[in-house]
Amino acid sequence: MAADLRARADRGDARAACRLAAEAMYCDGAWLAAREAERSAQRVLAHVAKMPVDAGTRERVRGQQAAAEANLAATEARCGGVDPLDPAERVHYWRQAALAGHPAAMRHYAVGNAFRWRDVVEVAPQLDIYRREAESVATRAARAGDLDLAIALGLAYLGTRDDPSWRPFLAQVLRPDPARALAWLQAARAHPAVVALPPGHALRERLDAGLEEAAGQLPLDQPVPAPEALPVLAGVVPRADPRNGGIGDIDPTACDAELLRRH
């Protein structure tokens, strides 16, 4: 199964490339979490074994150990047959699928989720390529109806650093541009899925504040740009982080989507 998926990806199948990268990235995180949970439970169990604790506490700790072992077994069942990829290989397949027009891969690659901070030095050459491509990939996907990338673009073009601990890679590679920020933020704010959010919702408030901020940055002699064209797709629910436009990892099943048509 894994060998077939890689072979299809290497033949240029964008959905296979997306699935190969998504499964590898999901399972890499799952293995890290499961093994750390098991190590933590073992440390606690070993510590409690030396302590004069009551039977209830000892039983709870054994339960935690059993849960950690069950989680490790579930991860083995889910990921045991998944083809592991090194960081550069993962980026390669994400990029391949994104450039072919796979919408989920475009989102994942454009916002910067194909990269992990713990691997960033290993993929420095790919990051340099990403810096040149991220804007165009994100723009194409947003113009095809990706609301979260429209939000990510609008907030990235603001050039603000509201969350000092972390910013998406997309926000780090785009130069501040209040006109483009306005164009994307207007489009996102008018999207029915955003309009339907309840008053006081963090995303609505962030977009409203971003519109005010971008308008204030626009030179006085520059007209307010028209909103970007943002198609309304069925079932869209905004999930972008209102602080910085971050977007969570895609689920591997999203790789089954059809490719965008080329114009």
Image: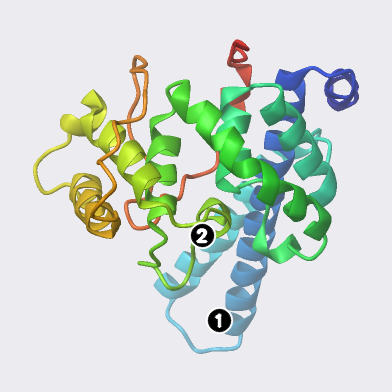
Judged left or right of residue 183, residue 137 is right
Judged left or right of residue 11, residue 112 is left
The residue closer to the viewer here, 133 or 247, is 133
User: Where does residue 74 sit, x and y in percent of width and height?
Assistant: 65, 41
Relative vertical location of residue 259 with respect to residue 164 in this rendering, above or below: above
The residue closer to the viewer here, 112 or 220, is 220
Judged left or right of residue 229, residue 4 is right
Question: According to the image, label 2 marks what residue?
Answer: 63
**Mark 2 closeness class: few <14, some 14–19, many ≥20 residues within 10 Å:** few
The residue closer to the viewer here, 74 or 109, is 109
Name the amino acid, label 1.
Val
**Mark 1 closeness class: few <14, some 14–19, many ≥20 residues within 10 Å:** some
Question: According to the image, label 1 marks what residue?
Answer: 48
Callout 2 secondary element: helix
User: Where does residue 75 sit, x and y in percent of width and height?
Assistant: 67, 43
Query: Which dot marks residue 22?
Result: none
Of the two numbered discs 2 and 1 on the same chain, state the one appearing first in sequence. Answer: 1
Q: Is residue 85 visible?
A: no
Residue at image coords 60%, 56%? 68
